[in-house]
Image: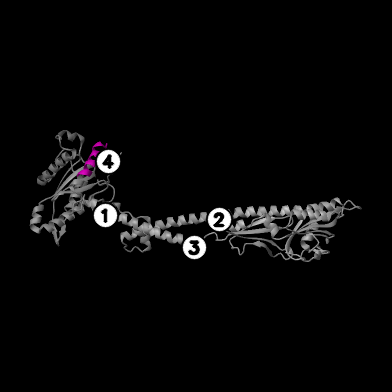
């Protein structure tokens, strides 16, 4: 339920001065947005045109929003590329590992042959021939008894490796010794072969039971060497990575030097890459993958920033334009509701506000300590004599100064109007004082009668003030066809004219 403002100790109502005309409404409604306030501080509180403040404020807010949008967009793109990089990296690491595992199984028939023959190599050529038919990428199949190559298939073109001691070869002995010591298969290479070309070697150590003791002894190696990189590319299609827009490199550490040894690559790879580990039987390979176009496209980012700036400028211009149009509309509408000379509400708009306030007043149950609505009519005494003596311009200045003083007395929910000539109507909220005029209205009357300084002269002005707090039971006197507002205004008008002649207040309810 609506409540009138509670009064102060002196009978006035709380709140700062709120004018009943254009000046007051603008003072109440004017609020700087946070962006405009920041701009004022940035400009060291210099006076800046209002339209420029609005433009800069909207531009600031829209620029912040667009920055957030650009960040979210490019962050999403960055995250998507990271996701795809990890997806492709894991898939290819798994495929390479699977392909190498399948290659390691090719050497098992040779290993089984020696085991079943208890160290005899009979049937090597037949077995090797069958393995070669199933895997055309094989360069050569070897048996290396005591680590020295003793059997070769095919012999033609590979005879240079006959008698090669794998354990004493400085370039390859690290992995051969590792296979011998761990009794596990090792993957060696890729390296340049004695017979020419690049090969990837799988060495399976062979241990046989000793006839004299229960321990096993090292017999030698079963070895298969594949053409590299053909054997890897047969099971892993690296073109998929390149076509998806990724640069990549497959590498391992050289077991002898510990340096990085590049096995395969698409070319130069950006520094911002993801690394994936490929665990083999005796070694670790690595695969580095990165988007070929880097994670954030700088050119695309620049275009997005430029378009965002253009968008913010256009949005700010349109917003400023429409706000100015709206403000002009409100200003014109407000000017239609005020008196041109005094800035107070005109009679038409006063009636609109008063009828609404009166309806709330008559339907509201006031507490004993609450301020009540008072309708006041104020008239400047002997105003015609002032015009005749000092001129109409001086009379207008008195009306303007009088209106300023009246506006200064208005508080929240209070308003005033110039009804015509030197007659004014106002609504105040005051504490009733029996049949006496409330102290607040008497104080207002005194301030309205303070000396006026007009054109270098000090003029004494007196006013007549009639006031009434409307009550429902008074409406029994109202004539048909007369509104409640007209009825109460007529009663207050009579009180004012009564004071004009007798200078004291009469009337019911005052």
Main secondary structure type of the part rendered in magenta: helix
Q: Name the residue rendered at 16%, 52% in the picture.
A: 449
Residue designated by label 4: 370
Q: Is residue 361 above or below residue 142?
A: above
Do callouts 1 and 2 mark residues in contact (Cβ within 8 Å)? no
> Which of 320/244 is in front?
244
The reply, left or right, for residue 458 in relation to residue 362 is: left
> Is 326 situated above or below 479?
below
* Cβ atoms under marks 1 and 4 closer than 8 Å: no
Residue under pointer 2: 81
Residue that carries the numbered disc 3 in the rendered image:
299
* Dot placed on the residue nearer the N-terminal end, 3 or 4: 3
Q: Distance between the residues labelled 1 and 2?
A: 52 Å
Residue 442 in percent (x, y) is at 19, 47
Numbered label attached to residue 328: 1
Q: Earlier in the sequence, mark 2 or mark 3?
A: 2
Task: Give the label, 1 or 4, closer to the camera.
Answer: 1
For marks 2 and 3, give the CA distance: 17 Å
Question: Is residue 501 a member of the stretch shown in magenta?
Answer: no
Percent of width and height locating residue 481: 15, 36
Give the label, 3 or 1, closer to the camera: 3
Precedes in sequence: disc 2 or disc 4: 2
Mark 1 or 2 closer to N-term? 2
Find numbered disc 1 in the image and state the secondary structure of the residue it sits on: helix
Left or right of 224? Residue 333 is left
Q: Give the range drawn in magenta.
A: 351-371
Q: Which of marks 3 and 1 is nearer the N terminus?
A: 3
The residue that appears at 27% across and 53% down in the rendered structure is: 26
Q: Give the SS element for disc 4.
A: loop
């Amino acid at each position: 339920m609506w409540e009138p403002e509670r009064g102060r100790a002196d009978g006035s109502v709380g709140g700062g001065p709120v004018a009943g005309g254009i000046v007051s409404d603008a003072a109440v409604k004017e609020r700087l947005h946070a962006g405009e306030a920041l701009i004022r501080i940035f400009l060291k509180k210099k006076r800046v045109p209002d339209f420029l403040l609005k433009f800069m404020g909207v531009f600031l807010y829209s620029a912040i929003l667009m920055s957030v949008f650009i960040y979210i967009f490019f962050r999403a793109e960055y995250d998507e590329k990271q996701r795809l990089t990890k997806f492709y990296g894991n898939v290819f690491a798994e495929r390479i590992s699977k392909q190498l595992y399948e290659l390691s199984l090719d050497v098992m028939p040779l290993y089984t042959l020696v085991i079943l023959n208890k160290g005899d190599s009979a049937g090597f050529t037949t077995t090797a021939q069958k393995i070669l038919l199933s895997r055309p990428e094989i360069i050569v199949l070897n048996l290396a008894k005591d680590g020295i190559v003793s059997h070769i298939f095919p012999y033609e073109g590979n005879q240079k490796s006959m008698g090669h001691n794998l354990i004493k070869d400085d370039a390859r002995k690290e992995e051969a010794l590792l296979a011998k010591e761990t009794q596990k298969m090792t993957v060696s290479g890729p390296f340049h072969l004695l017979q020419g070309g690049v090969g990837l070697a799988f060495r399976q150590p062979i241990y046989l039971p000793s006839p004299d003791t229960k321990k096993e002894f090292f017999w030698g190696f079963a070895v298969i060497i594949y053409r590299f990189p053909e054997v890897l590319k047969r099971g892993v299609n690296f073109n998929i990575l390149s076509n998806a827009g990724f640069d990549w490199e497959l590498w391992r550490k050289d077991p002898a030097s510990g340096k990085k040894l590049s096995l395969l690559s698409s070319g130069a790879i950006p520094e911002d890459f993801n690394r994936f580990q490929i665990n083999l039987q005796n070694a670790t390979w690595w695969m580095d993958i990165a988007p070929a176009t880097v994670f954030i496209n700088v050119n695309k980012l620049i275009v997005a920033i430029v378009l965002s700036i253009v968008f913010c400028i256009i949005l700010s211009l349109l917003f400023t334009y429409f706000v100015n149009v709206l403000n002009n509309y409100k200003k014109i509408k407000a000017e239609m509701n005020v008196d041109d000379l005094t800035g107070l509400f005109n009679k038409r708009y006063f009636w609109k506000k008063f009828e609404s306030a009166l309806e709330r007043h008559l339907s509201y149950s006031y507490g004993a300590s609450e301020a009540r609505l008072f309708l006041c009519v104020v008239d400047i005494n002997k105003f015609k004599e002032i015009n005749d003596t000092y001129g109409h311009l001086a009379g207008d200045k008195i009306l303007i100064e009088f209106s300023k003083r009246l506006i200064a007395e208005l508080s929240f929910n209070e308003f005033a109007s110039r009804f015509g000539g030197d007659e004014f109507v106002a609504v105040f909220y005051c504490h009733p004082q029996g049949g006496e005029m409330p102290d607040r209205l008497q104080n207002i009357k005194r301030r309205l009668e303070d000396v006026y300084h007009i054109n270098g002269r000090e003029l004494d002005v007196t006013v007549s003030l009639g006031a009434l707090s409307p009550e429902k039971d008074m409406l029994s006197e109202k004539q048909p066809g007369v509104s409640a507002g007209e009825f109460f205004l007529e009663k207050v008008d009579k009180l004012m004219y009564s004071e004009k002649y007798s200078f004291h207040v009469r009337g019911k309810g005052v």
